[in-house]
Image (spheres, coloured by chain):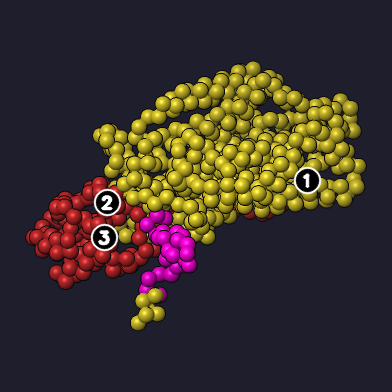
Amino acid sequence: MLEHTQLTDKELNDELLRDILTMPKWWLPAVLFLAAIVITGYSAFGYMVFNGLGVTGLNRPVFWGFFIANFVFWIGISHAGIMISAILRLTQAEWRRPITRAAEVMTLFSLAAALHTPLFHVGRPWRVFYWIFPYDFSRGIWPNVKSPFVWDPSAVGTYLIASTLFVIVCLIPDLAILRDRAKNKITKFIYAQLCLGFRGTTRQWKLQIVAGILLSALVLPIFVSVHTVVSWDFAVLIGTEGWRSTIFGPYFIIGAVHSGVSAVAMLMALSVWIYGLQNYIKPDHFDAIARLLIVVATTWFFFFFLEWVWAMFTLESPEIALRELQVGPWPWGPLFLIFVITSFVIPVPLWMFRRFRRSAAIMFFTTILVNIGMWLERFLIVIPSLMRRSHLTFDWGSYSPSLIEILIVTETFAFVALGMLLFAKAFPLVPIFDMKEGMRNRHLIKVGRRVIPATIREGLPHHYYNKEHH
Amino acid sequence: MAKRSVLGLYIEEDSAADALDHLRDAGFEDHEYEILTGTPYPEGTFGEAEPQHHLYRWPIFGALTGFTISLFYTSITQAAYPLLTGGKPVLAIPAMLVILYELTMLGAVIFTIIGIIFESRLPRFFMGAYSEKITEGYIGVTVTTDEDRTDKAEEALKKAGIDGEIIRGWE
């Protein structure tokens, strides 16, 4: 990281808490607009509950549609937040500091959005609970743990609880800063309760650092398992071509990382534009995440290619028929083309150029493209596999989403944006204590005729160095 | 005897380290004083003792608890509603493994969080001697001791050149 802005602790507090302690003009209209979309989505859901699932486009043989494609999409987005944060923490990458919090929070809201759609999809969400929790004593109905629909909530639920706790623990020192800076007595009292009386003792900081590493190490295996289990919702259904693939676990994970890391890059650009974080998120940060994206996108493309190769290699006529359907007739063929172009063909070559990697606008544009493509990928996995022509002609059918489904799916996007805006109004989107630590440990050093910022990091416990010296 | 706490604020790391030396010279023990900072410093920056903790035990207990609960959940529910599928055993171990894994990890995470809060000595209901300047970059050295020894503590803190006045608080 060659570029940096050196600020004092007070300046950091003032800059990063500005939008929390004061009300930006754009905030309320933005919140009201997003809230209106969310309310419209919930109203559509209410209409669906009242009238039944017939108001959706779901019908034999396509019983999984927009809702499930959207569920997989949001689970994918949720993956990068914690993954980026955990991996960068474990590897002590300096460029993580300004982006970890926003990425982690995005995980929380996208997981919550992901949970919306399968709950809506079942039509009667309250009945889902006895699929999962063993409480229906009177009727003697217990969860069927052999079903992937029990594995799935256990994996997603674990990930949601773990990520929420991870965010809360890492937020405690910043809540203490807010407690000290809040002017209003009630706000001060609330932050004082939330930070649990954190004072910044040596013990508390040590535990914070150990917690960051330990929780990262615990969350990463959960992260890997979640999308694998989500992929098994499809892959264990042995009767459906296109789904019964042994590669689905890693393919879904890398797809999730691709769309998720892209979403983080998109969020970085939005943070710079909306919250004026250009002192913290520099072109160097965009450069770093774009390099990561090149690796991720290429790996994802390799898995995508393998999935196709092994499917075609079987030379089984139903499998070939499905692939022909995915790439051929309207609308699947054009959608497939858009998916490949937006998720790989346009962005990756652009990321090869340093100038584009360092541009917030180009990164925003390309990562939006990736996420359009990755949404389509999930749509193309779910629908054509189900609608492929079966032996019995009365089972032939296609799928097009109804207005109700479109409104509910749109609601999930507004829900995540609204959640992020509300979070950023109450809590700092950049981890302030982490930024302060980074700035304190950074000094300008002279190398030949250049002066460059160098970061000093404690590599080993201090007693190790003491032993060396004495 | 009632405990009281006093706090001295310093701008430089060296001054805070000197304050700790003076406190030790004045007969104060490690558990009586603490460094308060707004950001983590490398261990031993102020010559303080390395804090000991047992956080690594918490995820192990949590994992064991999660595993036990998930074992009961998966086996008892299957035994209570036996679904014979294709002549396979009622207790389907591969299917159980998924839930066993997830709930084991969940137990580990939840216990780690409880461990972090417990080992950090949180929640703390009374702040004692504290200043909001600490989150602005000042380094605080706080001494919590018997009421009759606070003068001695104040003297040691002042000797290192505090910024402003001594801050006093009740424990």
A181 versus A403 height, above or below = below
The local crowd at label 2, few if under 14, some if 14 to 19, many if 20 or more residues have their Cα within 10 Å, is many
**Which residue corresponds to mark 3?**
B12
Work out which quarter of the rendered image holds the C terminus of chain A and state it.
bottom left
In this picture, residue A320 sits left or right of residue A180? right
Q: Chain of mark 2?
A: B
B127 versus A387 height, above or below = below
Cα gap from disc 3 to disc 1, whole angstroms: 64 Å
Locate residue A278, reporting x and y percent. 47, 43
**Which residue corresponds to mark 2?**
B134
Chain in yellow in the render: A
Q: Is residue A441 magenta?
A: yes
**Which residue corresponds to mark 1?**
A244
Closer to viewer: mark 1 or mark 2: 2
- Give, as a three-letter code, the residue at label 2: Ile
Locate residue A277, reporting x and y percent. 45, 41
- Give whichever of A341, A64 is nearer the camera: A341
Which tint was used for chain B?
red
Badges 2 and 3: C-beta atoms under 8 Å apart?
Answer: no
Mark 3 and mark 1, same subunit? no
Work out which residue is located at the far bottom of the displayed protein and give it. Answer: A470
